[in-house]
Each structure stands twice: as C-alpha cells, then as structure tokens.
Amino acid sequence: MSKLLIAGRWVAGDHSEVLTDCYSGQPYGEMGVASARQVDEAVGAAAQAARRIRLSPDERYRILMRAADLMQARKEKLLDTLVSETGFPRGDGENEVRRCVQTLQLSAEEARRLVGDIVPMEATPGLKNRMGYTVLVPRGVVCAITPYNSPLNVVAHKVAPALAGGNVVVLKPSELTPLSAVALCQILIDAGLPPECISLLHGPGAAIGRALLDDNRIQFYTFTGSTRVGREIQQAAGLRGTQLELGSIASTIVLADADQALAVGKIVAAGFRKAGQVCTSVQRVLIQRPIYEAFLEKLVEATRKVPYGDPRQPETVVGPMITVQQAERAEQWLAEAVRGGARVLVGGKRERAVFAPTILADAPPDARVVCEEVFAPIIVAIPVDTVEQAYERANDTPYGLAAGLFTRDLSVAMQAGVNLQFGGVHINETSSSRVDVMPFGGVKDSGFGREGPRYAVREMMEERLVTIAF
Ligand code: NAD
C-alpha cells in the first residue's frame, strides 16, 4: 500500500485505489488517496518545519550524497516498481535510476556552493562607508507536482535542488506512478533527512493537486506536466514563484550533409524511448529533400528491428504506454492522419497498451500527430528543401522545449542556436539529448525556469541584499 507522508509520519489515506500493471492490466498494489484535511495538515506541518528546521549546507550535502548511494543500493527493487508503474523495459528503468543518482549527487554539490555576491557600493560617486552583499535564503515550502513519465528522475530534479537550498518540500507525484515517489522519500529519510522536511500526498490532480494551488503557505511551485495544467498553476500561483516544465512538439532536423548512420541510430533510440512518452521525444523528423527517400528507408529499416512488447522480457526495448486509453488515443490520431493521406511505413499496430514503434510519412500538416503533442512511439517524417524551411517548420508550433540538428556544416551548426526557438538546441544529437548537469527547460508554451540542479537551486532560493553603513 502506498502511504502518505504527513508531518514526518507515514499514514493511510482517506481511501485507497487499486494500481494496475501497465502491461498485464493486473492489480499490483494500492494507493492511499489523501483527503482535503490531510492536504491541509501536510502543508501546515511543512510550513512549521520550514520555520523550525535549519540544516546547514554541509548537512544537506551529506544527506543528498547518502541518498544517492542508497538509491544505487536499492536499484533492483526500484526497477521492479518502475516496470509495474510505468511499463519501462529494463533499459529505460536503469537509465531512470542512474540519472536519479546523478541528480541527487549534483544537487548535493550545489548545496556546498551556495554563495551570494559582494555589491561594490562605494563605486557609486560620492558614496562612502557603505558595503553590501547578498545572501541566499530558502524560499520556505516548495510544492513539487510531477508527471508519470519520469517518476524518479523528474521528481529528483524538483525535490533534490529544493532540499539543497534548505527548503521543505510537499510532493504530489502523478497518481499513475505513486510508488517510485514513496521509495524516493524513504531513501531521503533513511539518508538522514528529518522526515518533517518532506511530505508526500497522493491522489488525482484535479482534487489533490488543485487543493495545493490555493494554499498561500506554499511559496514556490515546481511543476512538470502538460501545458494545460501549467497554465492553471501559474494562474493560481499569482505572485508566488513558479518553475514550469510543460508540453512540447520536438523536431530533429537531418540535413543532406549529415552523418546518416549516426542520425538514424539516435533518432530511433530517442523517438521510441519510454514508448515515446518523453517531452523531448522526436515527434517530427525534418529531412532535407536530396536524402529524404534514402534516409527514410534507413529509418524504417532500423525501426523494424526494435523489439517491443512485454517489458519484463530482457530483449524488449519499447514497452507499453502508460494506459490502454493513451494507446487508443494514439491509434485514433494515427487513423485520422491516414484518412488524410498519411502512409504508415512501419508499425501502426496496437495491442492493449502496447503501440508498435511507428514511422509515418505524408501526414497532412493539420493532423494531430503533426500539430499536437503525440506522446507515443510515433515519428512523423517531413521533407524540407532548405535549412531556412527546416527552421520554419521546427519553430511553427506553440512549444519550444528542445530541437536537434544533424549536419557537418559548422556555420549552420553555429547559426542554429540562434534560429531555432527552443530552450535547448542540440547539434549532431536529437531533441531528446539530455544529461542532468544541463540547464533544461523551455520557451513559449513549453514553460519557463530551468531544471538542472545548479540552475534550479537558485530559482528555489531568494537572493537577499544586506547593506551596512559604517
Ligand atoms: P499532467 O499535466 O496531466 O499531470 C502532471 C501532474 O499534475 C500530475 O501529478 C497530476 O496529478 C497533476 N495535476 C493534474 N491536474 C492538476 C490540477 N488541476 N492542479 C494541480 N495539479 C494537477 O501531465 P502527465 O500526463 O502526467 O505528463 C505528460 C505531460 O508532461 C506531457 O505534456 C509532457 O510533455 C509533460 N512533460 C514535460 C517535461 C518537461 O520537462 N518539459 C518533462 C516530462 C513531461
């Protein structure tokens, strides 16, 4: 049973819901769902802890480092949980754990690097005997609301920098993946975090998530999820701080001079990883006309070889999607594109929640697989004539999270960083290239603020100015 963590104690929820395995559809556990009273109690206790508990930067460093070690030691158990909750095959699960360990370590290191600034007050004409400096202070209570598609590492990208900055956290993970969050909280407590410094609430977003938004005892919201919910959070947060990592339609461009073998391998891996349920997943691949047919052939060939199905089979690379309903939605979007003239070059089949890795060509520009976030293992191939046209096609979505570009031309590579309107532009990598040390976040409807412990920890702290006259 997945319990709630309130005021330093694990407690049962108001009622419970059955959790079902993504692949088999069989029940594997239960989730305790919080009541409105428990939400209020958790935030109240967190606010009290934020006033009462002061951990030194070195204590925070040690706790987060120990948590990284414990996470590594508990890897096998965590992998079991991930397979049931998310349907990730072992490779995706191992990646999630490995990156979570990194994120905890990077956050620990930031705790020891928190320094303010010296302000040269006396450089002002006529000003004497004044000095100024800034100090970084915790914001207080940070509320983290997280999605289902990265139930350890995205949670760590919120929780670990918040704790590194000396904040107290209230965590509301996706109701589809509550058990990974339970494991992470227990690891932090076992690593020495005072349990009052983190609360965990489970339940549906519209009830439990929503209830957290109107509580002014929370000073900062760090959210990853859909743009729709991100807007709601921003509206409710008002003048309080937010960091919003939202939706995306990511493109990767392959120019005629690209290393095609490199591009094929990376695009297939990035487009189908976690069954395409990654915010930076390659949804559109924009291929320059002279190589369009030949490149597509290679892409289809490589996709055909991707083993998919049961995530517990060691050879499986692409497992099920998060629910049968999501896979059905992808199927409907595909059928709609096909009715509009699209050709399925490989894949296109669904069995329960498993959607075969799919490459689509000739999709109409207004089909949902092209112009809405597909979040499924579907890559749409689009021919482009020039580099400028490729930029135009990549930029013509409401989103701006990440883009990739394969080319051997150094000047094109240099200009791409300016011309592609995304939070991250990756040359000779796909849109989905990420290591946890990076500043990571979007522009436009993909949100604002940056993950990456070095950047996030500062967003979750206040820089306060102190001046002294003497
Ligand atoms: P979602 O927006 O449906 O849910 C995310 C979280 O918000 C969940 O915990 C949910 O319970 C909660 N929530 C839902 N309604 C709420 C409300 N009214 N008030 C407060 N909380 C509420 O997203 P999802 O389906 O879990 O995840 C998929 C989405 O996440 C995709 O759009 C994807 O692009 C995005 N995502 C973005 C990034 C990024 O870094 N930009 C990373 C991963 C996922």
Image (cartoon, rainbow, N blue to C red):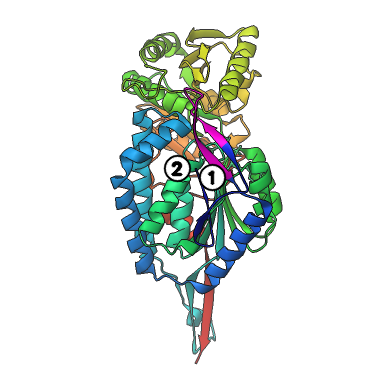
Q: Residue 173 carries which label?
A: 1
Q: Nearer the viewer, residue 375 or 470?
A: 375
Q: Residue 180 carries which label?
A: 2
Are circles 2 and 1 on residues that touch, CB within 8 Å?
yes
Residue at the image position 48 percent from the left and 58 percent from the top: 162
Return the x and y of residue 155 as percentages of the image width and height.
47, 47
Q: Nearer the viewer, residue 370 or 5?
A: 5
Name the residue furthest bottom.
Answer: 470
Query: Is 303 rendered above or below residue 238?
Result: above
**Residue 200 placement, left or right of 152:** right
Query: Is 73 rendered above or below residue 264?
Result: below
Query: Of the residues shown, which amino acid type is indicated by label 2?
Result: Ser
Region rendered in magenta: 18-32
Query: Is 401 rendered above or below residue 4?
Result: above
- Residue 29 in magenta stretch: yes
Element type where label 2 sits in the image = helix
- Is ligand 1 within 8 Å of the beta carbon of the residue shown at mark 1? yes
Return the x and y of residue 426 as percentages of the image width and height.
42, 35
Give ligand 1's quarter of the image. Answer: top right
Q: Can residue 219 be seen in this view?
A: no
Residue at the image position 48 percent from the left and 15 percent from the top: 358
